[in-house]
Amino acid sequence: MPNEAFDTPLTDIEGLVKRSHSAFATGKSRDIEWRKSQLVAIKQMTLDNEKALLSALKQDLNKCEQESWISEIGFVTTEVDHTLKHLKKWAKPCKVSTPMVAMPGKSFVYPEPLGCVLIIGAWNYPYQLVLAPLIAAIAAGNTAIIKPSELSTHTAKLIAELVPKYLDNDAFSVVNGGKEQTSELLKHKFDHILYTGGETVGKIVMRAASDYLTPVTLELGGKSPCVVDSSADLNVTAARIVWAKWLNAGQTCVAPDYVLVPASLADTLVSKIKTKLTEFYGQDPAKSPDYGRIVNQRHHARLCNYLEGHNVAHGGQADASDCYLAPTIVINPATDSALMQEEIFGPILPIITVDDVEASIDIINSRPKPLSMYVFTKDKAFEQRLLERTSAGMVCVNDGFMFAVNPELPFGGVGNSGMGAYHGKYGFDTFSHMKTVMKRSFLFDVAVRYPPFSKTKLNLMKKLL
């Protein structure tokens, strides 16, 4: 529940937005050294307050130290390091070729910042999903308003406490609160909005942005399929599925949402997944120091409702008072059930059996385009068919979402799973306008393009263009 005592007063929001716009207008955020100083400050803020961050993440989601470091703290510091290493090159004007008709002249693409941007984060990775977009926005030379999720209360509070201590107070502000604060923010003009969350709110953000023709990046999610072929190494496959699915108790937008496997292979795969679950989290995951909790009781109830009437092959134990739901496997749920129609965003894994692995392609294509897709196979021909005949924001072959650790790869969806991308250079580009610049000389002002026109001029232009 939102903490009203800590929420940003609605009456303060207009002033914060104006201050950020004014800071951009001074031009200071365009300076590369200023950008670097702010990026260094983010890294320092993260490292100085590692213990506090670990504590906040533990309180919000019961994240263990290693999980928090890999997916939140280390992710942010690595993103800063990568950005600092490449920033000068990214920000440099890029010279491109110039056609004969425009000679003598030179052509360039100038990356320039968009202005004041709004970053709306999500609760499942409450530090990373605010700070990683902020790193990209700063690298591109923007100022920003940051809106952490109100559901991860402890992390949101900590972000609000730390940002003013480390970053430029005029350029960057944190707005905390719930629906009212977000709605108030969306009444104001921004130069770009990046939202991470669900499709329903994504549509609201996009509608609000349309009033100002503001560009948006939407990171939405969806039902990410996982295809297992008979040629796969099932021991490794099971371990990697368990890691990717039950990290953060399944509350990951790119977690496998359902598995498609040939019926002849299903029992063996399920058995190996159960074995790996026991190896990773013990006989009773409720007692494991490495297994997380559902963010709140509302989401816990939603997930428990998903299980009603289904064939639960493993898990299903729940404790609402602790927001605990055991790693759970469901076999062949009805395709029209809520479990198969909505993004699960929790520790439930449906296993769907198919007559043959080729049928997986039709099933995937019958659904909205997912944020991610996974295929476990040694069959290169099938791998290629899946890549060519299906669409997803990101694909990983023979692993979970390891693409997220590579800053050279874009992170983003397609269709219902989102639009736009960030991470590394792609984040810099998202928060930049690539300005066209052509420089020409006063010399050789050939009259071929000027009226009066003639056949001779036209024929010459055809050769030059």
Image (cartoon, grey):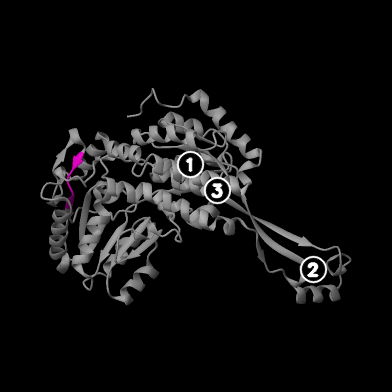
Numbered marks: total: 3
Element marked by disc 2: loop
Mark number, residue 119: 1
Element marked by disc 1: strand
Residue at the extreme left of the image, as rendered: 283
- Foreground pick, 360 / 255: 255
Which numbered disc, 2 or 3, marks the residue that appears first in the sequence? 3
Numbered disc in front, either 1 or 3 = 3
Mark number, residue 104: 2
Q: Label 3 crowding class (10 Å Cα cut-off): few <14, some 14-19, many 20+? A: many
Query: Which image quadrant: the N terminus?
Result: top left
Above-or-below relation of 352 to 294 = below
Q: Which amino acid does label 2 sit on?
A: Pro
- Who's the residue at 24% across and 54% down the image? 335
- Who's the residue at 17% across and 53% down the image? 329
Give the magenta range: 324-329
Q: Are marks 2 and 3 in contact (CB under 8 Å)?
A: no
- Who's the residue at 39% across and 51% down the image? 75
Location of residue 117 (image quadrant): top right
327 drawn magenta: yes
Mark number, residue 89: none
Q: In this figure, which residue is indicated by the disc labeled 3?
A: 36
Q: What residue type is labelled 1?
A: Ile
Magenta segment, prevailing SS (helix, strand or loop): strand
Location of residue 180 (image quadrant): top left
Q: Which amino acid does label 3 sit on?
A: Lys
Q: Can residue 240 be seen here?
A: yes
